[in-house]
Image (tube, rainbow, N blue to C red):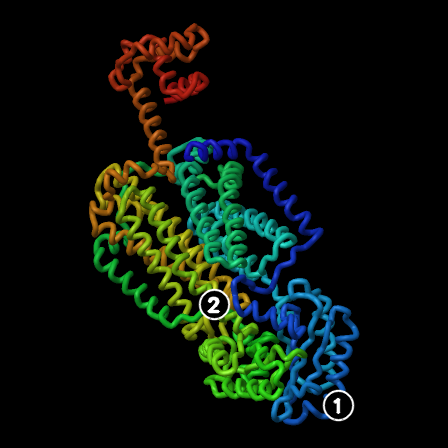
């Protein structure tokens, strides 16, 4: 791979205008159809294999209640008790609801709260539901605006507080650009500090944005073929932007390091791509495998999110391997690094002195820090955020609060129960008595506020009741109630030969969370095993991979623990703009596992490959670790800080789901890069000594050899430079006559066969050759021997003459 990437880098550097044109063409071909037909994302999170969803379909079939249709709930509150039912307000509210139904053909039905007695006890609040004829994903913005216009008019005519909620309102939630702007701005500052160059700092950002636009554009086009949740776009933007900048940073950083010793910028670009490019490809493939591994969970929307994220990673890799070399070639004079003065290197710095000077203390501090953050994981609960966790300024949060205060928090998450009463369908008296007993049994359960009267089907085969919990949808008590209601099915079967099953959004979310929670061990196990095998192949060691995956597991658990502290227990929640506490996003753990795995392996490879290279030459563990920290540490720090800035910027979004992902990924990167990779890993590697690099010989023989950072390429380059240097040192200033003859190569007739014969018959090594004994043909043959082909002969001669 290193040779291929080397050639690719040289090609892109040589054909820089073609490289720019290709990416302009790609962007244009993606954005043009999007401009003609904008993408449509789903606002619902669905999954297969959920029993409550099957029950929901039964309810829709038996009662004609289609829960999949978009709904806007209009919540009204008066300033004084009894005011909501005064004549003027009743007339105004009724007229508003009639106008909503009349003015929009997409409105299927509108409930009248006065007819349905949906009034609170002190007659100060009520609510009405507007149901549309389409699902939220297809709800037209004009329909939402019409409802808003009618509500605005009612507000002007009355003193009522009116707020909106429901699936129809979620359809207008859009991802802003504030987060991206903040993340990019901070990343630019970090790059400026790293490279001390305005142009160099801009290159990774330009590359990342081009890759991001391409991947997001393709995802948008795919929405016309597949149903893609809008949260997918958020994740793709996070990953594409962060990885795009990081991968470009790795290559640009390596180019500038190589350029300090290599005059030719094209050659330096090739070497940078052949070395750091391999690590980028490895890291990118690792992340793609991890996010595609979300398919193992067996949940459709997670599979879609994983594939979309993999697409953004793919373009981050592609732009880094093609666009970055092009940009470097265009601006190579402007980003020229300062020449270095050759002197003995000092690999000691503050960090290596601390970590390697006191490895026991460093390892212990890191383990204690992460261990402390792991403790809250024991109390971690998973769920789907409801309107009660939205921003306090949002109309959905205000509507949720009014219903909670005036009716009861449980009214925000009612639980429908479908009762199969076929056993008593021909005995009305027994049917009435037994259904009443079922309701009494449920009323006597813990955490139940109220149970509605039953709705019977015409054939008396089914009864439908609605259970209102005491607390909201994400409360622990509501989760316990759902379990008790499911367990009641056995009692109903034994007592009445009835079958009961529950549904509703609250129960569906509980079931989804449980399924996601159950999938974590399998997914994490596969990821950890994959990491161990990959690192064992790369570093030819058993302990290095073991330390790496153990560190990954610690940083993962610490990340989930920290996120639990913030999101669930409210620690520092105000700092991150979180107005209400609740469970963690149900699919946050699996997403965090997939992404942190890829990033952890990225940093592990970038650090330990340099350590491994040095150890292979010196067999000095301490020295090798110092070299790794000194040379790879700065770019790991810069990359991690860029990742952190991009991820943490998403806490400025109003959506609590996006906030939670931003917090988890941002601090996950910090914990893994700074505590694990730059602290625990070097300390433990030093403490284990030579055992860190042990691999059984039988295992070494069967494992494939992978050179992801192009060490062989660099080794060949160094050997070539040394050989060329040896050739040039053979000749002394006294050989001016010979060099004068060599300059005029047209005077001599030496064909390729003669050159090869001369080389073949010369058994001496380069160092053993004495210039005085060399004929002109032998000298030319020797130069030919050091070239890859006959075309390089004149170049070598010119280089010799310049020296």
Which picture quadrant has residue 537?
A: top left
Q: Residue furthest right?
A: 102
Residue 803: quadrant of the picture: top left
Q: Is residue 479 visible?
A: no
Q: Residue at x 73, y 67 (%)?
A: 142
| Number of other residues with Cα within 10 Å of mark 1, as a class: few under 14, some 14 to 19, many 20 or more | few
* Rendered location of residue 241, percent (x, y): 51, 53
Asked if residue 519 shows in the view, the reply is yes
Per the image, label 2 sits on a secondary structure element best described as: helix
Q: Quadrant of the N terminus?
A: top left
Left or right of residue 712, residue 87 in this image: right
Label 2 near label 1: C-beta < 8 Å? Answer: no
- In this rendering, is residue 15 above or below 317? above
Helix, strand or loop under label 1: helix
Q: Is residue 776 above or below residue 167?
A: above
Residue shown at the point (41%, 21%) measured from the top left = 788
Tell me the tag on residue 513. Answer: 2
At 58% from the left and 48% from the top, the residue drawn is 214
Between marks 1 and 2 in the image, the one whose residue lies nearer the viewer:
2
Q: CA distance from mark 1 to mark 2?
A: 46 Å
- Determine the residue positioned at 48% across, 63% down: 587
Residue 441: where, in percent of width, then height? 50, 86
Q: Position of residue 571 (x, y in %)?
A: 41, 74
- Which numbered circle lies on residue 581? none
Give whichever of 267, 683 is nearer the camera.
683
Position of 599 relative to 579 (above/below): above
Place of residue 144 in the rendered image (x, y in percent of width and height, measured from the top left): 70, 70
Determine which residue is flagged by label 1.
Answer: 88
Q: Specify whether 136 is left or right of 711.
A: right
Query: Looking at this rendering, what residue extends furthest in the front direction?
Result: 426
């Amino acid at each position: 791979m290193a040779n291929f990437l080397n050639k690719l880098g040289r090609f892109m550097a040589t054909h820089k205008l073609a490289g720019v044109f290709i990416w302009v063409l790609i962007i244009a071909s993606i954005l043009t159809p999007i401009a003609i037909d904008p993408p449509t994302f789903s606002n619902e999170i669905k999954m297969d294999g959920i029993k409550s969803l099957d029950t929901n379909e039964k309810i829709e079939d038996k009662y004609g209640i289609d829960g999949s249709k978009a709904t806007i709930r209009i919540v009204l509150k008066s300033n004084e008790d009894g005011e909501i039912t005064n004549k003027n307000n009743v007339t105004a509210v009724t007229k508003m609801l009639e106008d909503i139904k009349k003015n929009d053909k997409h409105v299927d039905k509108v409930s009248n709260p006065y007819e349905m007695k949906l009034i609170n006890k002190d007659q100060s609040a009520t609510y009405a539901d507007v149901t549309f004829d389409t699902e939220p994903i297809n709800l037209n913005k004009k329909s939402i605006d019409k409802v808003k216009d009618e509500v605005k008019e009612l507000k002007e005519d009355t003193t009522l507080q009116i707020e909106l909620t429901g699936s129809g309102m979620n359809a207008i939630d859009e991802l802003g650009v504030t987060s991206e702007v903040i993340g990019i701005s901070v990343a630019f500052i970090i790059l400026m500090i790293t490279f001390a160059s305005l142009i160099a700092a801009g290159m990774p950002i330009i590359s990342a944005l081009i890759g991001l636009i391409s991947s997001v554009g393709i995802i948008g086009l795919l929405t016309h073929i597949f149903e893609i949740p809008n949260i997918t776009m958020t994740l793709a933007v996070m990953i594409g932007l962060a990885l795009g900048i990081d991968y470009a940073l790795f290559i640009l950083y390596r180019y500038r390091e190589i350029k300090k010793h290599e005059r030719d910028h094209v050659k330096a670009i090739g070497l940078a791509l052949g070395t750091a490019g391999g690590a980028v490809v490895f890291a990118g493939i690792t992340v793609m495998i991890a996010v595609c591994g979300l398919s193992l969970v067996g949940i459709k929307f997670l599979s879609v999110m994983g594939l979309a994220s993999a697409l953004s990673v793919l373009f981050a890799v592609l732009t880094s391997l093609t666009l970055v070399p092009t940009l470097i070639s265009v601006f190579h004079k402007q980003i020229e690094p300062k020449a270095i003065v050759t002197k003995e290197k000092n690999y000691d710095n503050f960090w290596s002195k601390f970590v390697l000077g006191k490895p026991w203390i460093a390892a212990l501090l890191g383990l204690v820090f992460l261990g402390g953050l792991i403790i809250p994981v024991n109390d971690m609960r998973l769920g789907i955020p409801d309107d009660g966790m939205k921003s306090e300024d949002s109309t959905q949060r205000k509507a949720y609060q009014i219903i909670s205060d005036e009716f009861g928090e449980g009214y925000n998450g009612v639980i429908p129960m479908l009762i199969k009463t076929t056993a008593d369908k021909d005995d009305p008296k027994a049917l009435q008595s037994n259904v009443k007993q079922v309701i009494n049994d449920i009323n006597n359960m813990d955490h139940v506020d109220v149970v509605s009267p039953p709705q019977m089907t015409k054939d008396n085969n089914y009864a439908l009741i609605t259970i209102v919990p005491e607390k909201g949808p994400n409360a622990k008590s509501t989760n316990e109630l759902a379990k008790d209601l499911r367990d009641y099915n056995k009692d109903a079967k034994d007592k009445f030969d009835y079958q009961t099953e529950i549904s509703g959004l609250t129960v569906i979310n509980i079931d989804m969370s449980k399924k996601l929670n159950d999938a974590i061990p399998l997914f994490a196990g596969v990821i950890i095993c994959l990491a161990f095998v990959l690192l064992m192949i790369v570093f030819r060691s058993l302990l290095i991979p073991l330390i790496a995956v153990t560190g990954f597991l610690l940083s993962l658990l610490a990340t989930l623990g920290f996120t639990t502290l913030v999101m669930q227990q409210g620690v520092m929640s105000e700092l991150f703009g979180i107005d209400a506490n609740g469970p963690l996003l149900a699919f946050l753990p699996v997403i965090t596992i997939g992404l942190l795995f890829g990033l952890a392996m990225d940093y592990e490879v970038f650090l330990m490959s340099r350590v491994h290279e040095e150890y292979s030459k010196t067999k000095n563990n301490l020295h090798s670790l110092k070299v790794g920290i000194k040379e790879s540490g700065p770019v790991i720090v810069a990359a991690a800080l860029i990742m952190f800035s991009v991820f943490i910027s998403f806490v400025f979004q109003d959506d609590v789901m996006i906030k939670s992902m931003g917090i988890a990924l941002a601090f996950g990167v910090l914990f893994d890069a700074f505590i694990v990779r730059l602290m625990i890993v070097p300390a433990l590697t030093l403490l284990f000594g030579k055992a860190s690099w042990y691999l059984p010989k039988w295992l070494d023989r069967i494992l494939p050899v992978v050179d992801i950072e192009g060490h062989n390429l660099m080794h060949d380059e160094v050997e070539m430079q040394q050989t060329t240097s040896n050739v040039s040192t053979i000749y002394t200033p006294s050989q001016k006559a010979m060099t004068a003859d060599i300059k005029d190569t047209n005077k001599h007739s030496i064909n390729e066969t003669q050159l090869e014969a001369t080389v073949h018959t010369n058994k001496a090594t380069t160092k053993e050759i004495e210039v005085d004994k060399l004929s002109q043909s032998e000298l030319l043959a020797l130069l030919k021997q050091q070239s890859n082909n006959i075309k390089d002969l004149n170049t070598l001669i010119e280089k010799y003459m310049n020296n």
